[in-house]
Amino acid sequence: MKVLFTFPGQGAQHPGMLQNLPQGDSLLEQASDILGEDARRLDSAAALQHTRAVQLSLLICGVAWAQQLMARQLTPDFVSGLSIGAFPAAVVAGALTFSDAVKLVALRGELMEQAYPQGYGLTAITGLTQSQLEPLLGSSWLANINAEQQMVIAGSDAAMAATAQRALAAGAQKAQRLAVSVPSHCALLQAPAEKLAEAFTTVKLQRPRYAWLSGSSGRVLWQPERIAQDLAFNMAHTVCWHEAMVAASERDVGLAIEMPPGAVLSGLTRQALTHGEAIALEQSGSELALKLAQRVRALR
């Protein structure tokens, strides 16, 4: 059986997430040099009001915790990230250097925030299937298919509120506005995605050492150019996390370890795995992750 590292997207962030990272000083110093600012301040409550700081914090945090596990001989067979989480996944897989990722993620956050500085975002809808929700979308978009009955919509505040009201009337259990200030994973971000794709032409990606599973398409990608295209355009494409985790299960993944911060992905991943376990490192700790990985590897 195999091991998967997962990396969360926006909404998982919290103030202080970059403090006390395992060997975090080195990564934070690197990021500071690249950005020309103190990366240690990216995780303040004020900074996290901005998309750029959120995405950079998630990148640094995910890479730091994955590298800590890998330094203890726990290497993944697969990596996958939701939205911005695809970038630390690419770094950990060896497809993208950390320095290039910092530059690209800083630009990604800026482009997304500049496109829609206010009045837009994401809302999670729980309790309806994709086929039940789609007729209710109105002028909003289906952004994430996280589980069979856990969807995320994107759009303006007014459009999302109207869709949420229709969804609740149709039997949805919950409609919750997420801590994301841009309408990610829909056609509204096509233009920023094209600008990011231009920036990717100046960066050289490598064939990954570990299988890179796209959270957008649910496919394993090995070709550097296809990974680059997926990373550039995932902001404008629907997230198909459930499909990706079903693909992981079909490829004999027996343990999925979610990198900090948060534990949302573990719950979503657990619903798709037909065997094995999904844990959040922030909750379970490194020692349990190492023990479970040893048990999974013994079953090969």
Image (cartoon, rainbow, N blue to C red):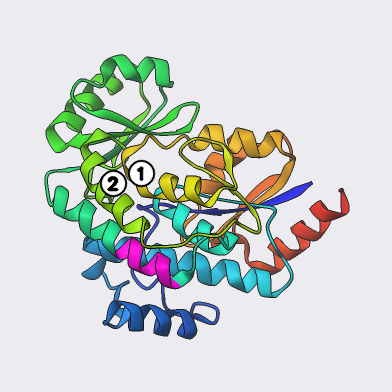
Q: Is residue 137 magenta?
A: no
User: Where is 57 relative to 276, above or below?
Assistant: below
Q: For the residues marked 1 and 2, what is the alpha-carbon distance in whole angstroms?
A: 5 Å
Q: Which residues are magenta?
A: 99-106
How far across and how far down the image is residue 170, in percent?
A: 31, 15
Magenta part, dominant SS: helix
| Residue lying at 19% horizontally and 54% vertically, measured from the top left | 113
| Residue 86 horizontal side relative to residue 110, left or right | right
Q: Nearer the viewer, residue 169 or 58?
A: 58
Circles 1 and 2 in contact, beta carbons < 8 Å: yes
Q: Which residue is mark 1?
A: 233
- Neighbour tally class for label 1: few under 14, some 14-19, many 20 plus, Cα within 10 Å: many
| Residue lying at 27% horizontally and 61% vertically, measured from the top left | 107
Examine the image and state in which quarter residue 175 appears: top left
Under mark 2, the amino acid is: Ala
| Residue lying at 49% horizontally and 77% vertically, measured from the top left | 21
Examine the image and state in which quarter residue 65 appears: bottom right
User: Which element type, helix, strand or loop, lies under badge 1?
Assistant: helix
How far across and how far down the image is residue 57, in percent?
A: 37, 67
Which label number is shown at residue 193?
2
Q: Nearer the viewer, residue 92 or 283?
A: 92
| Residue 83 horizontal side relative to residue 43, left or right | right
